[in-house]
Image (cartoon, helix red, strand yellow):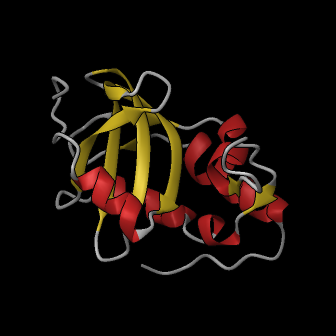
Amino acid sequence: MELLKLQTIEEYRKYFVDNYCNTNIYCYDGMKVNFYEDQFEHAFYESKNHKKRDKSIFSMERAQRIPWIKEVLMNEEVEIYVGWDREKKKYNENRRISIITPENYVIVLNIINNKKAKFITAYVASKTNATKIRSAPKWNKKGY
């Protein structure tokens, strides 16, 4: 998968809005994924302090992979797992985590119903994080 090389944060934001927020996007299994402009900061910024989760630093690594989101969602070979709820310390059947190898690129969706989801974030997982994701239950349309 190729990287998107733009000049400014605003160009990346415009690309995200034009290609995701203003377009109908579907997963390979027919689930519609809604994208919202206010998710840009959450998805394409990183925290200076991971404990505070402040999302204060623009992540070129994440932004350059914006086109990968659609590719992963439409890929029938993608691995899909149930997401983890950090606050409740348990698996959340309304979170769907897609991961593709060898890049360990992760997409997190919030499931609204069996036909619709909301995009939460996308990132390249560390080897440790990817291993944790792969230890989660496999996701299916009924949860896990």
Q: Is residue 91 above or below residue 9?
A: above
The foreground one among 90 and 25 is: 90
In this picture, residue 77 sits left or right of residue 62: left
User: Which corner quadrant of the image does residue 27 belong to?
Assistant: top left
* Residue 22 visible: no
In this picture, residue 14 sits left or right of residue 130: right
Q: Residue at x 19, y 37 (%)?
A: 139
The foreground one among 52 and 18 is: 52
Q: Residue at x 81, y 63 (%)?
A: 9
- Residue 67 position within the rendered picture, expressed as x and y whole percent measured from the top left: 51, 65
- Residue 127 position within the rendered picture, expressed as x and y whole percent measured from the top left: 38, 70
In this picture, residue 39 sits left or right of residue 135: right
The foreground one among 50 and 120 is: 50
**How many numbered marks appear?**
0
Q: Residue at x 74, y 48 (%)?
A: 55
- Residue 18 position within the rendered picture, expressed as x and y whole percent measured from the top left: 65, 51
User: Which corner quadrant of the image does residue 53 belong to?
Assistant: top right
Q: Is residue 64 above or below residue 133?
A: below
- Residue 111 position within the rendered picture, expressed as x and y whole percent measured from the top left: 36, 26
Quadrant containing the N terminus in the rendered view: bottom left
The foreground one among 28 and 77 is: 77
Quadrant containing the C terminus in the rendered view: top left
* Residue 54 visible: yes
